[in-house]
Amino acid sequence: MVATRSRRGLERIKPQVVADYKYGMKGVDTSDQMVVSYPSTRNSLKWSKKVLFNLFDMAVVNAFSLHKVLGGRLTQLIFRKKLAEDLMQLGSHHGREVRSRSISRSSLPAPVLQGIHCQISTPHGRYRRCRLCYTRGVRRMTKICSGCDVPLCWTSCFEEYHTQNASTSR
């Protein structure tokens, strides 16, 4: 048991476990306050994404704390802005934005590699029905191919359509 005094001067007795817990929570409480100051999570996100963004926020706060310990004088907001700028510079490659796609460029059909065909958004962001899926009785909305102005799914229809047309045009 630990005896402590309140603000009014009254003596209170707490179990040692409570005193140890409160002493150890000082750093965690400060860290949590700093994470909440500039959160990157949104209400519409799934819980798994919220956990990921919370871990990212904690990593940023830890980096900021390290910056302060090493003598840095930036505020947390300026530190976060500088970090975002540095990460965006790392994400660009020779002045171009690097796009991450689930399909590697080597797996794309040959016309795409030549830069002739790629999927683009339709005017006003509207989607159109995939031509091949529509002939099969499936309603699937997608973007259009810039080279041939045909709406095609990015999965298999895009490659299938272009290989069919490449073999018929030869």
Image (cartoon, helix red, strand yellow):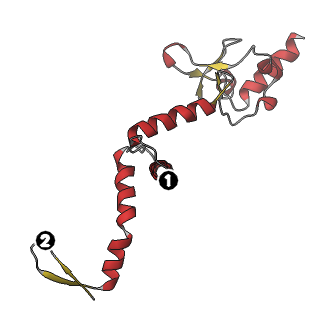
Q: Residue at x 35, y 61 (%)?
A: 29
Q: Quadrant of residue 17?
A: bottom left
> Do residues under tags 2 and 1 come within 8 Å of each other at their CB atoms?
no
Foreground of the two, 123 or 74: 74
Q: Quadrant of residue 118?
A: top right
Q: Quadrant of residue 38?
A: top left
Foreground of the two, 24 or 165: 24
Percent coordinates x, y for residue 21 in the rendering: 35, 75
Read off the residue under disc 2.
Answer: 7
How crowded pointer 1 is (Cα within 10 Å; few <14, some 14-19, many 20+) is rated as: few
How crowded pointer 2 is (Cα within 10 Å; few <14, some 14-19, many 20+) is rated as: few
Asked which secondary structure carries label 1, the reply is: helix
Percent coordinates x, y for residue 147 in the rendering: 71, 12
Percent coordinates x, y for residue 114 in the rendering: 80, 16
Question: Residue lying furthest right in this view?
Answer: 170
Q: Residue at x 75, y 16 (%)?
A: 115
Foreground of the two, 8 or 129: 8
The mark lying in front, picked from 2 and 1, is 2
Foreground of the two, 139 or 150: 150
Q: CA distance from mark 2 to mark 1?
A: 37 Å
The C terminus lies in quadrant? top right
Q: For the residue marked with disc 2, what is the amino acid?
A: Arg
Read off the residue under disc 1.
Answer: 55
Vertical arrangement, residue 79 with respect to residue 106, above or below = below
Percent coordinates x, y for residue 79 in the rendering: 45, 39
Q: Find residue 84 and name its label.
A: none
